[in-house]
Amino acid sequence: MSSFQIEGGRRLSGSITPQGAKNEALQVICAVLLTSESITISNIPDILDVNNLISLLGDMGVDIKRENANTYTFKADKVNLDYLQTEDFYSKSASLRGSVMIVGPLVARFGKAIIPKPGGDKIGRRRLDTHFIGIQKLGAEFHYDPSAKRYEIEAKKLTGCYMLLDEASVTGTANILMAAVMAEGITTIYNAACEPYLQQLCKMLNAMGAKISGVGSNLLTIEGVTKLNGCQHRILPDMIEVGSFIGMAAMTASEITIKDVAYNELGIIPDSFRRLGIQLEQRGDDIFIPYQKNYTIESFIDGSIMTIADAPWPGLTPDLLSVFLVVAAKAKGSVLIHQKMFESRLFFVDKLIDMGAQIILCDPHRATVIGQGNHLHLRASTMSSPDIRAGIALLIAALCAEGTSTIHNIDQIDRGYQDIDIRLNALGANIKRI
Ligand SMILES: CC(=O)N[C@H]1[C@@H](OP(=O)(O)OP(=O)(O)OC[C@H]2O[C@@H](n3ccc(=O)[nH]c3=O)[C@H](O)[C@@H]2O)O[C@H](CO)[C@@H](O)[C@@H]1O
Ligand SMILES: C=C(OP(=O)(O)O)C(=O)O
């Protein structure tokens, strides 16, 4: 397994363009299973998770043509359902979380799906109840085989209904939506997740002939159709990458421009960084982050200590809290980072503490960061990346530290960040892949 060797203490400068969004790519690539016609998707990021899903679809018999580096055409006219019974399918689909979203399309189109317990980050319990209860409500039957860790789903017919989701699960909403587009009658999904990537999925499905209304809200109404057709779709820039670059620029006192960020789709992300005292300017569809000698965390209006917490969209995405946490260590002032959704995502703070950051892990969900401003001199360290977002946070810390750090297990970073070493080296970083 590869590692990164990072010589810290360099300022970055120049422009960087975010890749296409990983979490949108995983949704819309699964949606190609809903039709036998061709679907062309552009701005697909060249990252491990997405490539694994594309290869899984190829093994299932989907015809895949790579038009250029980031554009693919998919044609699912000969899906081999027998492949779902194989060991190969089991091990490949178990390795990534996004694969669970093949269930909705397969049940909608073929009345049957098999899926192992999916992979993805080990960041706490990650239940799938919302997915399965929703698809069950449409008329599917579920069996979970605990010894094989495998779900089998079958439906003779799917029928639309009203459902109130027990939580606004992102992949759960996507899965149910993809099952419902070809169910008979009307499905109403209340407490639906509504983040931009899900809106993108809705737009793509509507372009394929689906009838979804309420897009962007937490109440989706779907009028079932009997058949969907091909379409063309472009994936949004990755907002988690955009946020990671904002944090990286601030912590390394760099001046950079992040190009073509789809600013209007970033929700509360820019303002949340501003609350840490980080200046950023919208310039057209770019974000300019000026050189800042230091940045000071705001207090709440009543003078109490700032909290940065995640919440379902349009709240702050949980996937950026690790970045907020590391960046706060070099701010002036204190902040409570409250990771409400996942219970094992903050343990990496031990590594930051080893490097010299002042952080108290209050419990698995909360960490208090006492920012040291320019008094913080992080020491280089050797560490291992426990998950994708802790991985990028450690990389940011290493870029800021004095000396040469090593990060092992960088597959976890490659899972979500395309050629991150090459792209950051182009800004002046010194990262070696070893
Ligand atoms: C492949 C993909 O797209 N992964 C994303 C997707 O995962 P995923 O779709 O798996 O995450 P879910 O939205 O289902 O929820 C994640 C966790 O948050 C909890 N929860 C969820 C909703 C809610 O209203 N309250 C609540 O506490 C759930 O219990 C669960 O433990 O959405 C997560 C939440 O944005 C992101 O971190 C993941 O990067
Ligand atoms: C948790 C994440 O991914 P996944 O859901 O694929 O594990 C993430 O992208 O931060």
Image: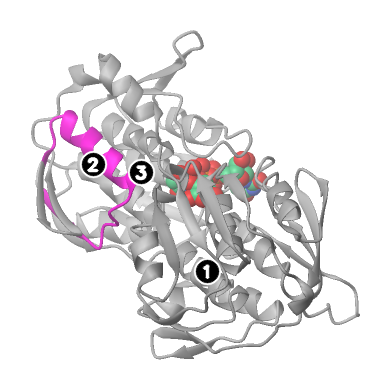
Which residue: 49% across, 72% down?
A: 266
404 left or right of 88 in image: right
- Indicate yes or no whether the magenta region holds residue 114: no
Which of the 4 image quarters holds residue 181?
A: top left
Q: Which residues are magenta?
A: 38-63
As measured in the structure, the alpha-carbon distance from the residue carrying label 3 to the one carrying label 1 is 20 Å
Reading the image, the residue beneath label 1 is: 243
Most foreground residue, 260 or 135:
260
Quick check: 54 left or right of 344? left
Look at label 1 and name its amino acid.
Gly
Above or below for 12 versus 144: below
In this figure, which colouring scheme has been used for the structure?
A: one colour
Element assignment for label 3:
helix
Residue 85, image x and y in percent? 26, 14
Q: Amino acid at mark 3?
A: Asp
Outermost residue, front side: 403
Indicate the quadrant containing the N terminus: top left, top right, bottom left or bottom right.
top left
Q: Position of residue 36 (x, y in %)?
A: 11, 40
Residue extending furthest toward the right: 303
Q: Residue 222, which numbered label?
A: none
At numbered mark 1, what does the secondary structure look like: helix, strand or loop? helix
**Is ligand 2 closer than 8 angstroms to the Cβ of mark 3?**
yes
Label located before the other in sequence (3 or 2): 3
Please determine whether, in this image, residue 433 is positioned above or below residue 253.
above
Please say if 375 is above or below 110: below
Q: Is residue 182 visible?
A: no
Residue 232 appears left or right of 268? left
- Residue picked out by circle 3: 49
Residue located 34% across and 55% down the image: 201
Q: Which mark is residue 54?
A: 2
